Image (cartoon, helix red, strand yellow):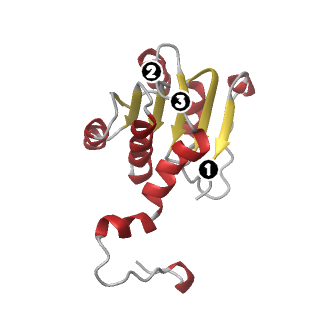
């Protein structure tokens, strides 16, 4: 990778890879979005849209917090398999937006109390908000492209909250 000097972090010789990996954003951003931004109580139904490095780290954070069920949504079967191996209790292969939201709402008995978006796409932000139950919180972690202004029905946020986690 080519980065500006201020973004480069020298790694000391002999630093174990599992420690050095925390310098990147995936684990720190994903787990912190659960344990610091959302703080779900044990037993909270939760969903994660997008299972890249950050999304999988959100799944791990939810497992640490004792969320249940933990629903993982992605289009890539291999990512769904990894999510199941690290704590997701239900996996959903993303398809039609309405069908995906319905599947999440069914898997969480009426909607997630905590919904995380780790992609940064307008369509998945909308699905994340629509997957919430009354009193739920949507946590937007994915980085949207510059200039994208997600829109959603304001009614979908009645009795719900929205948090944005910056990386």
Q: CA distance from mark 3 to mark 2?
A: 28 Å
Which residue is disc 2 drawn over? 99
Give the residue at x 51% y 54%: 29
Give the residue at x 53% y 86%: 5
Q: Nearer the viewer, residue 28 or 41?
A: 41
The quadrant where residue 154 appears? top right
Does dot 1 land on a helix, a strand or a loop? loop
Of the residues tagged 3 and 2, which is closer to the observer?
A: 3
Give the residue at x 27% y 38%: 77
Which residue is disc 3 drawn over? 41
- Near mark 2 (Cα within 10 A), the count class, few <14, some 14-19 or many ≥20, is few
Q: CA distance from mark 2 to mark 1?
A: 27 Å
Of the residues tagged 3 and 1, which is closer to the observer?
A: 3
Does dot 3 land on a helix, a strand or a loop? loop
Q: Earlier in the sequence, mark 3 or mark 1?
A: 3
Whether the residues at callouts 3 and 2 have beta carbons within 8 Å, the answer is: no
What x and y, as percent, mark residue 48?
Answer: 46, 36
Q: CA distance from mark 3 to mark 1?
A: 19 Å
What x and y, as percent, mark residue 10?
Answer: 43, 83
Residue 68 relative to residue 157: left or right: left
Q: Relative to residue 166, is residue 73 depicted above or below?
A: above
Quarter holding the N terminus is bottom left
Which residue is disc 1 drawn over? 165
Does dot 2 land on a helix, a strand or a loop? helix
- Near mark 1 (Cα within 10 A), the count class, few <14, some 14-19 or many ≥20, is some
């Amino acid at each position: 990778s080519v980065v500006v000097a201020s973004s480069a972090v020298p790694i000391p010789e002999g630093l174990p890879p599992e420690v050095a990996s925390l310098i990147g954003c995936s684990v720190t951003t994903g787990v912190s979005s659960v344990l610091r931004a959302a703080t779900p109580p044990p037993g909270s139904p939760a969903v994660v849209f997008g299972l890249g490095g950050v999304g999988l780290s959100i799944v791990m954070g939810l497992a640490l917090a004792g969320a249940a069920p933990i629903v993982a949504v992605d289009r890539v079967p291999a990512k769904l398999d990894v999510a199941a191996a690290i704590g997701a209790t239900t996996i959903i292969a993303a398809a039609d937006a309405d069908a995906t939201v319905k599947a999440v709402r069914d898997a969480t008995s009426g909607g997630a109390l905590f919904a995380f978006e780790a992609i940064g796409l307008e369509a998945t932000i909308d699905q994340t908000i629509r997957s919430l139950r009354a009193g739920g919180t949507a946590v937007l972690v994915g980085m949207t492209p510059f200039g994208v202004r997600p829109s959603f029905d304001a009614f979908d946020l009645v009795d719900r909250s929205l948090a944005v986690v910056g990386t």
